[in-house]
Amino acid sequence: MDFLSEIDNCSERLRKPEKMAPNVTEENGVLFESDAATPDLALARTPVEQADDSPRVYVWRNIILFAYLHLAAIYGGYLFLFSAKWQTDVFAYFLYVASGLGITAGAHRLWAHKSYKAKWPLRLILTTFNTIAFQDSAIDWARDHRMHHKYSETDADPHNATRGFFFSHIGWLLVRKHPELKRKGKGLDLSDLYSDPILRFQKKYYMILMPLACFVLPTVIPVYMWKETWSNAFFVAALFRYTFILNVTWLVNSAAHKWGDKPYDKSIKPSENMSVSLFAFGEGFHNYHHTFPWDYKTAELGNHRLNFTTKFINFFAKIGWAYDMKTVSEEIVQQRVKRTGDGSHHLWGWGDKDHAQEEINAAIRINPKDD
Ligand code: ST9
Ligand code: ZN
Ligand code: ZN
């Protein structure tokens, strides 16, 4: 009987092989340069897309808070346009830039990816900016983001874009994390983050520092400094500004994992999305970024116009507070473009080094003259 039921089990498993090991995906993207296994810095195998059908466990506290936040932000947007003093609007814009940099130059490029190093005064500035952004402590942000790159588009990726636009945008913050993420996450090395006393301080006192930096001070400052109303200050400089930046950040996970060219690696979802880059200070060149995540520019050289974060880091490099910036050689980028790109690699114009000779020969030239 035992033997027969064992056979039954075996044939059942053979009929449904996906039930045997629903989460077989291991590393599904490079995180640090040391993860790369090919000379042009890719994984040894082609990344996969994977999501199982386990039920979502809703977190009603988050659903209610995010619903309120978005309604309040729409009202805040109206006040921003028609009611607030110009000083309040400028202040909200300043907070957008500062907290944006706390995410892009801080949590993302410095702490999640270690793509450059920063002396303590810059780390202090970035931690302050990061706290204004309220996207959880930089340590927790970097932990989730390392999972996002290492296990991209699988159940161990916190905002697995295989689950669709809504999930990768905001849905992932409304449900419990997938057990696969928690299991694989145990293998992450976060010792570099915990060795920084500034980051430890931020995490330890986050529930005091964050409300002050993100909501209380942005409301109190306009009221006391230029006699703004409490309501304009709260809805514009705190809630509208905060919600706006959240959505810009989430667009990198949703839109830039869905729409755009893939000049560096066509086997992955992340794409070059110019509109996202514009609002996210250079963080929308997402196909390049997932191909070479340790590059402090998160893009190829030449994209500086939309890459405010790179300018910010370069400025601090000039005064010595940022250093040891990692980047990728032109030669390796070209090898990847040729081997795994979708053929959309940009040419800046006639004579670009990537301009194929056949295209040059085939071009129609009016009154040609080579000087
Ligand atoms: C927010 C973050 O919005 C946005 C991040 C976006 C990332 C974008 C990246 C794009 C690139 C950069 C572009 C930047 C552009 C910026 C432009 C700016 C202009 N590894 O989390 P818990 C374990 S935040 C290892 O509670 P639940 C661990 O043991 C918005 N282990 O899971 C942990 O315990 P502990 C404001 C992990 O219970 C335990 O699981 N914040 C990992 O399933 C429990 O963890 C909110 O709204 C991991 N990665 O709850 C809060 N993760 O922590 C939202 C977990 O003690 N979050 N573990 O070590 C929550 O409420 C909850 O996390 C939850 C899941 C409900 C979503
Ligand atoms: Zn991504
Ligand atoms: Zn990243």
Image (cartoon, grey):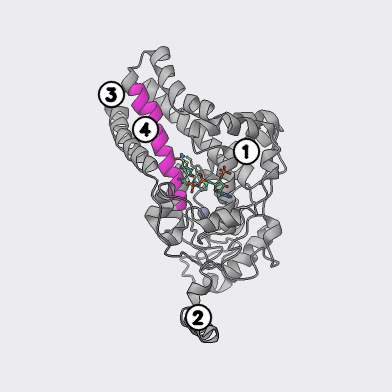
**Alpha-carbon distance for marks 3 and 2?**
68 Å
Find out whether residue 241 is within the magenta segment: yes
Callout 4: few (<14), some (14-19), or many (20+) C-alpha neighbours within 10 Å? Answer: many
Residue 138 spot, x, y in % from top left: 58, 38
Residue range (magenta) = 232-253
| Mark 4–mark 2 CB contact (< 8 Å) | no
| Mark 1–mark 3 CB contact (< 8 Å) | no
Callout 2: few (<14), some (14-19), or many (20+) C-alpha neighbours within 10 Å? Answer: few
Residue 192 falls left or right of residue 247: right
**Alpha-carbon distance for marks 1 and 3?**
36 Å
Dot 3: what SS? loop
Residue 122 spot, x, y in % from top left: 65, 31
Dot 2: what SS? helix
Q: Nearer the viewer, residue 123 or 194?
A: 194
The tally of labels here is: 4
**Which numbered circle lies on residue 83?**
3
Residue identifier under label 4: 240
**Mark 1 or mark 2, which has the lower sequence index?**
2
* Residue type, numbered disc 3: Ser
Residue 155 can be seen in this image:
yes
Residue 76, quarter of picture: top left
Residue 339 spot, x, y in % from top left: 60, 71
